[in-house]
Amino acid sequence: MKVPGLASLAALATLFLSAPVFAQAAPAAAPPFASLKGNAAAGEKVFAQCKACHVKDKGVNRVGPSLFGVVGRKAGTVPGYTYSAANKNSGVTWTPATLYSYLENPRKFMPGTKMAFAGIKNPQQRADLIAYLSTFK
């Protein structure tokens, strides 16, 4: 017994199942930090995302530690702030290149960090933010 449309349905299924599967191209890798020139004025605008938890004032901690002097500082060392063990014991020094990697995805960079921020995916915005953070001295 022939069922109307069954043959065309079977042909469509065969075509679909035998069609090559095309993988999506992997996203392009972010350019290395050294290839970017950060702009502190633009970074001040990016810093608006950080203000909910951080300030640039020395000795003032909020949800996150003060970012005064963060560039060049050893992770987990701001007095009066309670860090996660992951951060405190990381051995990381916040160089511009390290901050560039961290700020893309803090939880991937440092599993166990208390920082809930998802990260800044745009490489130029990260470079700009680091230029701005470098002025906190």
Image (tube, rainbow, N blue to C red):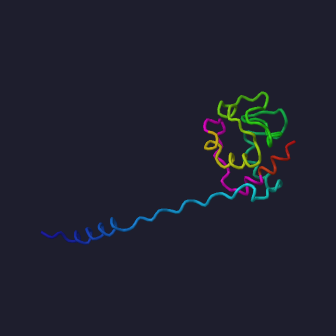
Q: Which residues are magenta?
A: 111-128
Numbered-mark total: 0
Specify the quadrant of the image occupied by residue 38: bottom right
Which corner quadrant of the image does residue 55 belong to? Answer: top right
In which quadrant of the rendered image does the N terminus lie? bottom left
Q: Is residue 120 magenta?
A: yes
Tell me residue 20's x, y (percent): 39, 67
Residue 14, quarter of the rendered image: bottom left
- Residue 36 in percent (x, y) is at 76, 58
In the image, is residue 11 above or below residue 36? Answer: below
Query: Could you tell whether 29 is left or right of 70 in the image?
Result: left
User: Position of 20 compared to 60: left or right?
Assistant: left
| Of 124 and 74, the residue lying toward us | 74
Q: Nearer the viewer, residue 94 or 59?
A: 94
129 vs 5: above or below: above
Residue at 85 percent of width and 43 percent of height: 136
Q: Please tell me whether residue 72 belongs to the stretch shown in magenta.
A: no
Q: Residue at 72% of width from left, 34% of height from top?
A: 63
Quarter in which the C terminus is drawn: top right
Q: Main secondary structure of the magenta part?
A: loop
13 in relation to 98, above or below = below
- Compared across the picture, whether 82 is left or right of 18 comes to right
Residue at the spot x=64%, y=43% of the render?
A: 109
- Where residue 51 sits in the image (x, y, percent)? 75, 43
Residue sticking out furthest to the left: 1
